[in-house]
Image (cartoon, rainbow, N blue to C red):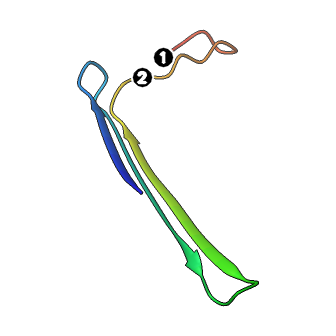
């Protein structure tokens, strides 16, 4: 599975990759990865700033 999402308002990019398959009749392997970049801001509620 491969998935890519771009959200223009905050400049967010998310890329997901998942690979899986059998190794034998009783064992399978799975690999998953996610890359996320966020060009927007995060509001710090404790300190009251962006």
Residue 46 falls in image quadrant: top right
Q: Report helix, strand or loop for mark 1.
A: loop
Residue under the image location 53 percent in, 16 percent down: 43
Query: Of residues 45 and 19, which is closer to you in this image?
Result: 19
Instruction: From the image, tell me which residue sits under label 2.
Output: 41
Whole-Å distance between the Cαs marked 1 and 2?
6 Å
The local crowd at label 1, few if under 14, some if 14 to 19, many if 20 or more residues have their Cα within 10 Å, is few
Instruction: From the image, tell me which residue sits under label 1.
Output: 50
Image marks 1 and 2: residues in contact by CB distance under 8 Å: yes
- 30 relative position to 17: left or right: right
Query: Of residues 45 and 5, which is closer to you in this image?
Result: 5
Residue under the image location 60 percent in, 18 percent down: 44
Q: Residue furthest top?
A: 48
Residue under the image location 36 percent in, 25 percent down: 40
Query: Of residues 17 and 46, which is closer to you in this image?
Result: 17
User: In x, y percent, where is residue 3?
Assistant: 36, 48
């Amino acid at each position: 599975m491969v998935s890519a999402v771009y959200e223009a308002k905050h400049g967010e990019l998310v890329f997901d990759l998942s690979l899986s398959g059998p190794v034998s009749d009783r064992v399978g392997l799975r690999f998953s990865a996610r890359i996320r970049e966020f060009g927007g801001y995060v509001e710090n509620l404790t300190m009251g700033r962006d």
